[in-house]
Image (tube, rainbow, N blue to C red):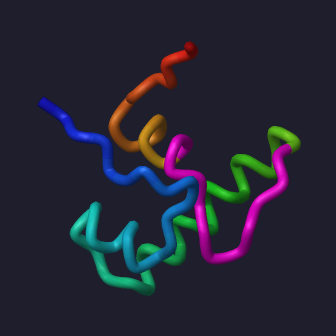
Amino acid sequence: MYEKISTKSFLNAEEVAKNLGVSKPHAYKVVRQLNDELESKGFITISGRVSTKYFEERFYGMESKTM
């Protein structure tokens, strides 16, 4: 069963690299790509960090549960 990556709202490139098993430079590219996608949808992003929720949706197909 899949366990949630983190309880944090945002992941940095180091955490993305660890989760995906890639180098930090590649993780920065992934973070940049995900942030570009979010910006095109009208969201505000933080450079060098990506929403944990969006990361999980894009890489693991997890959908958010509403309360």
Q: On screen, 32 above or below 4?
A: below
Q: Would you say residue 48 sits in the magenta stretch?
A: yes
State the quadrant of the C terminus.
Answer: top right
- At 44% from the left and 86% from the top, the residue drawn is 25
Residue 44 drawn at (x, y percent): 84, 54
Residue 41 drawn at (x, y percent): 81, 39
Q: On screen, 35 above or below 27?
A: above
Residue that sits furthest to the left in the current view: 1
State the quadrant of the N terminus.
Answer: top left
- At 50% from the left and 51% from the top, the residue drawn is 52
Residue that sits furthest to the right in the current view: 42
Residue that sits furthest to the top in the current view: 67
Looking at the rendered structure, the number of numbered marks drawn on it comes to: 0
Residue 40 drawn at (x, y percent): 82, 46
Identify the image quadrant of residue 45. bottom right
| Span highlighted in magenta in the image | 43-54
Identify the image quadrant of residue 42. top right
Q: On screen, 53 above or below 65?
A: below
Q: Would you say residue 9 sits in the magenta stretch?
A: no
Foreground pick, 53 / 25: 53
- At 42% from the left and 42% from the top, the residue drawn is 56
Foreground pick, 46 / 25: 46
Q: Is residue 51 left or right of residue 45?
A: left
- At 42% from the left and 51% from the top, the residue drawn is 7
Q: Is residue 16 left or right of residue 39?
A: left
